[in-house]
Image (spheres, rainbow, N blue to C red):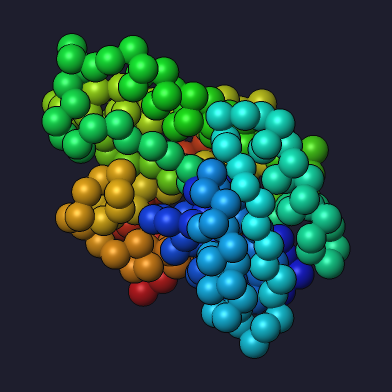
């Protein structure tokens, strides 16, 4: 991963943090964005400590993905941070869940929750990809975390599930209309603030993103949803 630049939104916690750590451990230049400015400083310090032999550069910027101008600043900063310029991997991992997972049925959802799920989990993905496009290097990949809730119609996930389904549709749209490999990764149930305490540790699935950014077949990524089985089968 030397000479590659990776930008991760939602990079201070959950899947985003674990993915940022995995790329830093491979020696990539990693730039994280988050709404929590204090968490940015702590995360950058920790990532610098875990960076492979100190070969990768780590930076962070307070970023609210609901604000496209924040996102624009993040990707512009990231594109100037690496040695060769531009972006090689983009992971739009910022997300929110209002309520308790599995206990927010659609028919009881508030407009406020719906609107913020949409602005963060769907529009935020759109903004991150849209603003990153002018900075993507040849062969760059965009990897959007997703989950079965986006496709399964499970009860109790309300507008969160709707927003994740929209994010998958956004990915398919960009994949169809651009020449870059833009896809979704479904790591299964992961223990995060958004999904609750049950599931895999985020660190256990972070390698899936490194694999998808480097060794996975480009056509298998582009416009598709890759799951744990594909990753495990390819890396046995």
The spot of residue 179 in percent (x, y) is 71, 37
Q: Quadrant of residue 50?
A: bottom right
User: Residue 49, relative to residue 233: is it above or below?
Assistant: below
Q: Is residue 1 left or right of residue 49?
A: right
* Outermost front residue: 38
Quarter holding the N terminus?
bottom right
The residue located at (56%, 29%) in the rendering is 66
Q: Is residue 122 toward the left or the right of residue 128 in the image?
A: left
Quadrant that contains the C terminus: bottom left
82 relative position to 32: left or right: right
Q: Residue at x 84, y 67 (%)?
A: 83
Q: How many marks?
A: 0
- Residue 197 at what x, y percent from top left? 20, 55
Residue 14: tell me if it is visible: yes
Residue at figure coordinates x 71%, y 81% from the top left: 55
Q: Position of residue 61 (x, y in %)?
A: 66, 51
Relative image position of residue 216 (x, y in whole percent): 53, 59
Which residue: 79% across, 38% down? 134
């Amino acid at each position: 991963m030397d000479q590659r630049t990776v930008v991760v939104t939602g990079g201070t916690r959950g899947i985003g943090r674990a993915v940022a750590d995995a790329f830093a451990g491979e020696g990539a230049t990693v730039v994280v964005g988050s709404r929590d400015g204090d968490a940015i400083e702590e995360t950058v310090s920790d990532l610098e400590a875990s960076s492979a032999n100190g070969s990768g550069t780590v930076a962070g910027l307070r970023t609210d993905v609901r604000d496209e101008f924040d996102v624009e600043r993040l990707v512009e900063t990231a594109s100037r941070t690496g040695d060769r310029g531009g972006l090689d991997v983009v992971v739009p991992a910022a997300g929110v869940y209002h309520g308790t997972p599995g206990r927010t049925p659609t028919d009881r959802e508030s407009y406020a929750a719906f609107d913020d799920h949409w602005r963060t989990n769907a529009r935020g993905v759109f903004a991150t990809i849209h603003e990153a496009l002018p900075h993507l290097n040849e062969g760059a990949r965009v990897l959007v975390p997703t989950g079965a809730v986006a496709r399964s119609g499970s009860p109790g996930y309300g507008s969160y599930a709707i927003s994740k389904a929209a994010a998958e549709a956004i990915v398919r749209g960009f994949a169809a209309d651009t020449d870059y490999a833009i896809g979704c990764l479904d790591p299964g149930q992961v223990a995060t603030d958004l999904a609750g305490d049950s599931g895999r540790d985020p660190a256990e699935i972070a390698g899936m993103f490194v694999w998808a950014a480097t060794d996975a077949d480009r056509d298998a990524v582009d416009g598709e949803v890759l799951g744990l089985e594909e990753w495990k089968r390819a890396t046995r």
